[in-house]
Image: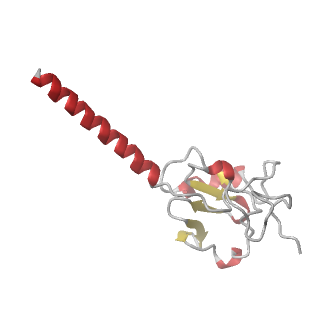
């Protein structure tokens, strides 16, 4: 009887540890930025074709190439600081789980050239600042001047 109780206790401890591990993995992903695609919850990386850069949801960092080196930065490079992240298309890298999405840059650049759009408005996770129309509104992600 003692062996059965010990075995059950060991199984419960193992199961509790496995559940804790799952929670930790889920918690480390982070929340998508408000300009991120609404369907992107749970995706770590976005590729942004118009500026040929990546966004890492888990670290809230942009990843872009500068003079042959991949830079991780909290900000877009100076040349793209005015880029409309709400209106520009983001490609969800759903099947990539590594640490260096740019290892596939040539494929991403070929498959998703500048101006790439899959033909449908991309709803955002959050609301554009100053836009009271909701996720994406009806202005197709562009400010009216």
Residue 95 higher or lower than 133, as above or below: above
Q: Position of residue 57 (x, y in %)?
A: 55, 59
**Quadrant location of residue 116?**
bottom right
> Does residue 115 appear to the left or right of 28 in the view shown?
right
The residue under the point 54% across, 65% down is 60
For residue 3, above or below residue 13: above
**Most foreground residue, 11 or 73:** 11
Q: Quick one: quadrant of the C terminus?
A: bottom right
Report the front residue among 24 and 95. 24
Which residue ends up furthest to the right in the rendered image? Answer: 145
Residue 58 vertical placement versus 65 (above, below): above
Residue furthest to the left in view is: 2
What residue do we see at 31% from left, 35% from top? 15
Q: Residue 17 placed where, x, y %? A: 30, 41
Q: Residue furthest top?
A: 1
Left or right: where 6 falls relative to 79: left
Figure quadrant of residue 88: bottom right
Task: Depth check: give the residue in front, 144 or 111.
Answer: 144
- Residue 4 appears left or right of 145: left
Q: Residue at x 15, y 29 (%)?
A: 6
Location of the N terminus (image quadrant): top left
Residue 127, image x, y percentages: 72, 62
């Amino acid at each position: 009887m003692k062996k059965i109780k010990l075995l059950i206790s060991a199984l419960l401890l193992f199961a509790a540890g496995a559940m804790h591990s799952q929670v930790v993995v889920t918690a480390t992903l982070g929340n998508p930025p408000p300009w991120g695609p609404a369907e992107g919850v749970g995706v770590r990386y976005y590729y942004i074709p118009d500026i040929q850069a990546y966004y890492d949801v888990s670290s809230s960092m942009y990843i872009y190439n500068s003079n042959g080196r991949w830079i991780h930065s909290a900000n877009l490079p100076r040349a793209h600081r005015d880029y409309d992240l709400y209106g520009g298309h983001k490609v969800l890298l759903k099947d990539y789980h590594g640490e260096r999405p740019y290892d596939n840059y040539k494929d991403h650049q070929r498959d998703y050239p500048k101006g790439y759009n899959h033909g449908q408005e991309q709803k955002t996770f959050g609301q554009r600042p100053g836009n009271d129309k909701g996720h994406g509104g009806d202005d197709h992600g562009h400010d009216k001047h």
